Amino acid sequence: MKDPTPKMMFEALFPAMLRYSEYVEAMQAKTKIAFKGEEGENLALRVFTDADLIFQEGIARELLKLEQKKGWRVVFLPEEESPYNAQFPTEGRTKFGLDPIDGSLVYARGHKTYCHIASLFQDDTLEGVLTHTPIDGRTYYATRERAEIWTLKRRKIEKRQYQIPQGNDIVISLDAPEAIARELRAEGVQIMLFGTDSMDEQLEINSLFRGETGGFFKHHASYVDWGPLGFIAERAGAKVTDFVGRKVDHKYWERKDGTPEGTIPGIIATTNPGLHEKILNAVAKHYKT
């Protein structure tokens, strides 16, 4: 069995991602909303729509075709439960992560700032990411070497280098302790927490790519969303570290440091070094590493 490179995988899946993105955008006004998890959990984590499954299962079908055609062996690790998930191998060197709609709550409320995130891992470490943002029609691609914007024209992929814009003093997080929020606000940081009144409902993690926010941070960052978006940001020029200021290794499984499987210990991504220092100082006081 061959192992696909990020370039091979994402060039093959790019047209399907655009096609299913257009489909779920067209059905946004009529989407069916449900809830997952336990009552009382953060609303941003619980909202789930039929569009999530439509996008996810569409990409799953494309991935199965590629595995059969090219002889790839890929472990499929999407965010949502689906019968399609059982059709993929459960073990292998290459893993494919998918967040079909990152920002389901934003999507359910009718805003366009959600995105689709596909990630490729080899030996449990992130090697490439492809993210499409419907609000501006942009598709961001990153490997360990660089970040690019992709455009599909006449069945050919046009690529240009992507440099992240300078953001503002708005920072997004989720479930951050109130002590951290108070400290950051005292430092002039506009911290917004998903699922609370502090959050602008039109903003998302990927808002950083358009200069609408200045950064984000997350303790135990997941392989489907916070981690991959930070991976793109770093390659595009943002300052990205863990909670003690070290370079993020993006190893999401078999860490042997007590971090839950499928996560890294923490990530801070900002477009401003001064803002990054404020966040780093705040989280260092409240999280053990």
Image: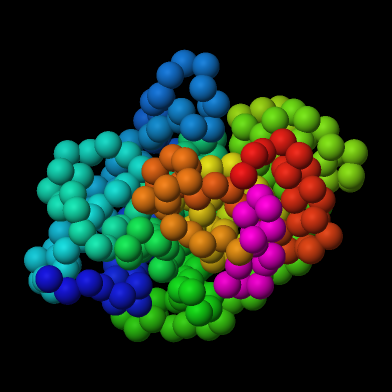
Location of residue 207 by image quarter: bottom right
Which image quadrant: the C terminus? top right
Magenta includes 235?
A: yes
The answer to whether one can see residue 148 in this image is: no
Query: Residue at position x 50%, y 50% from top?
Result: 264
Please identify the residue farthest to the top as the structure is shown: 39
Query: Is 98 in front, or is 202?
Result: 98
Location of residue 21 by image quarter: bottom left
Residues shaded magenta: 234-246
Give the vertical position of 159 relative to 22 (above or below): below
Which image quadrant: the N terminus? bottom left
Query: Residue at position x 72%, y 43% from top?
Result: 283
Query: Residue at position x 51%, y 62% from top?
Result: 249
Using residue 219 as the reference point, say whether residue 49 is left or right of it: left
Using residue 100 as the reference point, say whether residue 57 is left or right of it: left
Image location of residue 213, percent across then percent down: 72, 54
Number of numbered discs visible in the structure rendering: 0
Query: Residue at position x 15%, y 59% from top?
Result: 64
Using residue 133 as the reference point, say whether residue 30 is left or right of it: left
Please identify the residue farthest to the front as the structure is shown: 256
Give the vertical position of 139 relative to 55 (above or below): below
Image location of residue 81, percent across then percent down: 27, 36
Using residue 4 as the reference point, say whether residue 206 is left or right of it: right
Magenta includes 76?
A: no
Main SS, magenta residues: loop
Image location of residue 139, percent across then percent down: 48, 67
Give the vertical position of 29 relative to 225 (above or below): above
The answer to whether one can see residue 146 in this image is: yes
Image location of residue 85, percent across then percent down: 20, 45
